[in-house]
Image (cartoon, rainbow, N blue to C red):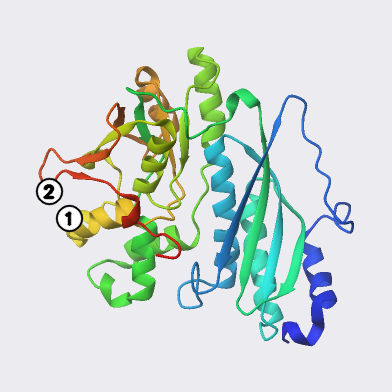
Amino acid sequence: MKVKDIGEQGLLRILQQFCPSDIIGDDAAILTTEPEKSLVVTTDVLVENVHFSEVTTSPEDVGWRAVAANLSDLAAMGASPMAITVGLGLPGNVEVSWVEYLYTGMTQCLGSFNTLIVGGDLVKAPVITIAITAFGQAHPQNIIRRNTAKVGDAIIVTGIHGASRAGLELLLHPEFGKNLDETEKQTLIKAHQRPQPRLDILPILRSTVETLNVTPLQISGMDSSDGLADAVLQICRASNVGACLEWQKIPTPKVFKSWLSPIQALEYTLYGGEDFEVVLCVPSEFAEILVEEIGGNAAIIGKITSNKDVRLCDTQKEIPEQVLRLDRGFQHFN
């Protein structure tokens, strides 16, 4: 059965099953926030053959990744998710089952965070286009911004970088992973297809700040969905500072050292993107405590400097010292 066979209203009736019946049905959704909370809103658009393709991503994984991208933005702002709306553009020959699987993937990701689909829009389009708007909330003092990094701050990442890009390469070129065992391959592929937005760090940030009595929140940050280098550069640009990163301290998949050349590992780690971790700039005196509380593969990877450039250094001399640039990562229209 094709979308064109059942039309807009027929498809809407199917998609309404993924939304709470007491919220949808009007021209807009009404969301009640808590007192002394700020509403945080973010929108992300995914386009077929730009952000996903049938070669690398099932419809369920497309749905998951579309939601994860938005929830990751909320996490980077220090906001807890409330709901999303979905704008969906479809060619008429898309199978209805593909759309149902898409929404299944969305609800699977949302279910981990008690978040609902509360509406959206549906249009005919030349290629599949998914525009998600996510709504979150946070106390004004707990909102994380890009423009508050200060000289001397430690730079923290919440986890491994480079895995998603490696997973994408394995999906596009299976022969590339002939030296990897199946577990290693699937771990990297899962990092690309089912990224985990780091909403788990929010209560850790709040409790650490309260324990250390450093309110209001003295943290700057953003997510690394467009690449680790992009995140650090964007923070530094917004805060009018620079940074020094230490290559050997950046957490990467263990398999990189035996599988990739140093140049490939550098490219995947700094510019690969879609790892959906969070980059945080925090006062150095409580950076170690915060990393320990986050656990896992969280690490201090550098510091904020008064110079305006972002430099990558390597004490082991595997790679030359270099200035990082935005134009080396993925940029639309380049």
Rate crowding at label 2 as few (under 14), some (14 to 19) or many (20 or more) other CA atoms within 10 Å.
few
| Mark 2 / mark 1, whichever is N-terminal | 1
- Give how far apart the Cα atoms at labels 2 and 1 are: 7 Å
Residues at circles 2 and 1 in contact by the CB criterion of under 8 Å: yes
Label total for image: 2
Q: Report the front residue among 176 and 31.
A: 31
* Residue at the spot 85% in from the left edge and 75% down from the top edge: 9
Rate crowding at label 1 as few (under 14), some (14 to 19) or many (20 or more) other CA atoms within 10 Å.
few
Query: Residue 226: which numbered mark, if any?
Result: none
Residue for badge 1: 262
Q: Is residue 22 left or right of residue 238?
A: right
Q: Quadrant of residue 135?
A: top right
Label 1 residue SS: helix
**Could you tell me residue 245's position as x and y percent?**
26, 37
Is residue 298 shown to the viewer in this render? yes
For the C terminus, the image quarter is bottom left
Position above or below: 333 against 285? below
Q: Quadrant of residue 16?
A: bottom right
**Could you tell me residue 82's position as x and y percent?**
71, 43
- Give amino acid for label 2: Glu
Residue for badge 2: 318
* Residue at the spot 73% in from the left edge and 72% down from the top edge: 123
For the N terminus, the image quarter is bottom right
Position above or below: 92 against 121? below
Q: Report the front residue among 176 and 229.
A: 229
- Give amino acid for label 1: Pro
In the image, farthest residue toward the left: 317
Q: Is residue 87 left or right of residue 219?
A: right
Q: Is residue 329 left or right of residue 192?
A: left
**Could you tell me residue 244's position as x and y percent?**
26, 34
Label 2 residue SS: loop
Is residue 183 shown to the viewer in this render? no
